[in-house]
Amino acid sequence: MSHATIAVIGGTGLYQIEGLTDIQDVNLDTPFGRPSDSIVVGKLEGTGVAFLPRHGRGHRILPGELPSRANIYALKSLGVEHIIAICSAGSFKEEIKPGHLLIPDQVIDRTHGRPGSFFGDGIVAHVAFADPFCPRLRKVLYESAREAGATVHPQGTMVVMEGPAFSTRAESRLHASWGADLIGMTALPEAKLAREAEICYAIIGCATDYDSWHEHREAVTVQVILDILHKNIDTAKKIIKLAVGRIGAKRDCECATALRTAIVTAPDLMPPETKKKLELLIGKYIT
């Protein structure tokens, strides 16, 4: 089995980082189905790194159709302890301009109908999610982005909407009135599932537009988003390479033990089939 301790979830092409060696495609199946695509695993300066195209190669999967549980479970099975997620996003602030990056520290969930937990079917767990993104990984990404020469904002709130249509002007103005900074479609349930899997998770939010709140800007289009993302791909690669060298093996954040006090179902009442399904996640706590 291939092994990686750091994963990147984002668009295609990111695995072409200079210096990546021993590259192989890994096809996995999980108790929650198959991931979005095969996972590219390689070595970057001696560290195992996995790359997963969130929407599949060729961008085939809608945000609301993403097999997020399978994606996170598959990365966990490879040994991943840190996930760097790259997301395009609309900006609600004049000062967060298209092309800027933001490392969010908070999130507002406006999705609906997406499977958002590994638990259920007889086993209940409630993880703490007050701080949805790993603070230590966020710090690494911010410092790496600055060193890479990006214009990056160190914190902010991201709204995650269902999509796939972009916001109405009324919705955009509402979200802006809440004090939110960015809006995207993919950070949830990824972040919640990563917490349940005890994986450190943080986002590089790439501002590609002003959503539709801005009176003097045209409404967002796919072409506008893609143009900005393509311009930022080299910067993202630089950030990832710098971050991999800074993350380190030690984890003393709350992410690493998120399930320690979260599982509330009595072990003797857990259905054997569900217990087996979740063995990768709960095995160190439930014998």
Image (cartoon, rainbow, N blue to C red):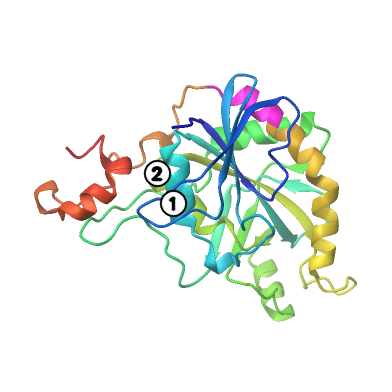
Is residue 206 one of those drawn in magenta?
no
Real-space Cα separation, disc 1 to disc 2, in angstroms: 6 Å
Which element type, helix, strand or loop, lies under badge 1? helix
The magenta stretch spans which residues?
A: 241-248
Between residues 251 and 36, which one lies in front from this camera angle? Answer: 36
Q: Quick one: quadrant of the C terminus?
A: top left
Between residues 34 and 232, which one lies in front from this camera angle? Answer: 34
Picture mark count: 2
Q: Which mark is residue 50?
A: none
Mark 1 surroundings within 10 Å by alpha-carbon count, few (fewer than 14), some (14 through 19), many (20 or more): many
Q: Residue at x 11, y 54 (%)?
A: 269
Q: Is residue 31 above or below residue 108?
A: above
Is residue 245 one of those drawn in magenta?
yes
Q: Is residue 51 above or below residue 187?
A: above
Residue 130 at least partly seen: no
Quarter of the view holding residue 47: top right
Q: Which residue is mark 2?
A: 197
Q: Amino acid at mark 1?
A: Leu
Which element type, helix, strand or loop, lies under badge 2? loop
Between residues 109 and 122, which one lies in front from this camera angle? Answer: 122
Quarter of the view holding residue 184: bottom right
Q: Residue at x 53, y 69 (%)?
A: 111
Which secondary structure dominates the residues rendered in magenta? Answer: helix
Outermost residue, right direction? Answer: 216
Q: Residue at x 64, y 72 (%)?
A: 164
Q: Amino acid at mark 2?
A: Ala
The reply to whether callout 1 and callout 2 are in contact (CB within 8 Å) is yes
Q: Position of residue 243 (x, y in %)?
A: 66, 29
Q: Which mark is residue 193?
A: 1
Q: Position of residue 183 (x, y in %)?
A: 67, 62
Q: Is residue 272 left or right of residue 262?
A: left
